[in-house]
Amino acid sequence: MKPVDLAKKLRREAAFDPAALDRGKAVLMAAIRQEVEPTHRPTIVPQLPYEDIGAALSFLERAFGFSEISTSRLVGKDGVILHALVEFGDGVIGIGSQGAHGAISPKSAGIESQYISVYVANVDAHYQRAVAEGARIAKGLPDHIRGVRAYEALDLEGHRWRFLQRVREVPSTK
């Protein structure tokens, strides 16, 4: 039951039984915590360095559909974002400062050193969204290869992203 529904139920019960408030408080707080706190925390969280974390967060949301985990943002005394986490499905990626732990953005390094694969529900729609938001397409959408349909795109600082959809999930175009 959602916290809002629990609160309504608790109000109704408290009108007849004031002790219901004490009993219901623990249940309500547990429901709120479960809704606010993730129930699953990944054990591996890749970190990507960016020169401009704010711009990266905005681009990753618009072009690729990531969502920032708002409670994760770390801001310096000067107001500059130092680190944040973004999520997509059940995956999480850290977005950090260039140079942190020796990591450098491909924009500064002049070379890509990795790519990240992300499975999506509809790769064709995802591709169109990425193109519309200015992602640089490195490899377009070929026909189905080895059970997947995929494309690769570079974000605003040159990190390579590979978005895939399993063939059995790809809707027929006929």
Image (cartoon, grey):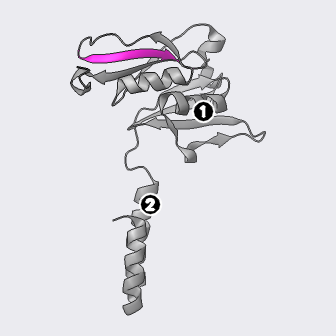
Q: Residue furthest top?
A: 110
Q: Nearer the viewer, residue 15 or 98?
A: 15
- The residue beneath circle 1 is 58
Give whichever of 125, 112 is nearer the camera: 125
- Image coords of residue 161 (percent x, y): 46, 19
Nearest to viewer (mark 1 / mark 2): 1
In the image, the segment drawn in magenta is: 147-155
Residue 72 % position (x, y): 56, 43
Dominant SS of magenta comes to: strand
Visible residue check, residue 18 = no
Residue 167 in sight here: yes
Neighbours of disc 1 within 10 Å: few (<14), some (14-19), many (20+): some
Where is residue 166, by image quadrant?
A: top left
Which element type, helix, strand or loop, lies under badge 2?
Answer: helix
Q: Is residue 152 magenta?
A: yes
Q: Which mark is residue 16?
A: none
In the foreground, 170 or 34:
170
* Marked residue nearer the N-terminal end (1 or 2): 2
- Residue 1 vs 77, above or below: the answer is below
Write the residue at 42% across / 74% down: 7
Residue at 56% from the left image edge and 46% from the top image edge: 70
Q: Amino acid at mark 2?
A: Arg
The answer to which quarter of the image holds residue 100 is top right
| Lateral position of residue 174 relative to residue 150, left or right | left
Q: CA distance from mark 1 to mark 2?
A: 28 Å
Q: Is residue 141 above or below residue 94?
A: above
* Residue positioned 38% across, 70% down in the render: 5
- Which residue occupies 59% across, 32% down? 57
Image location of residue 97, percent across then percent down: 65, 28
Which element type, helix, strand or loop, lies under badge 1? helix
| Residue topped by disc 2 | 33
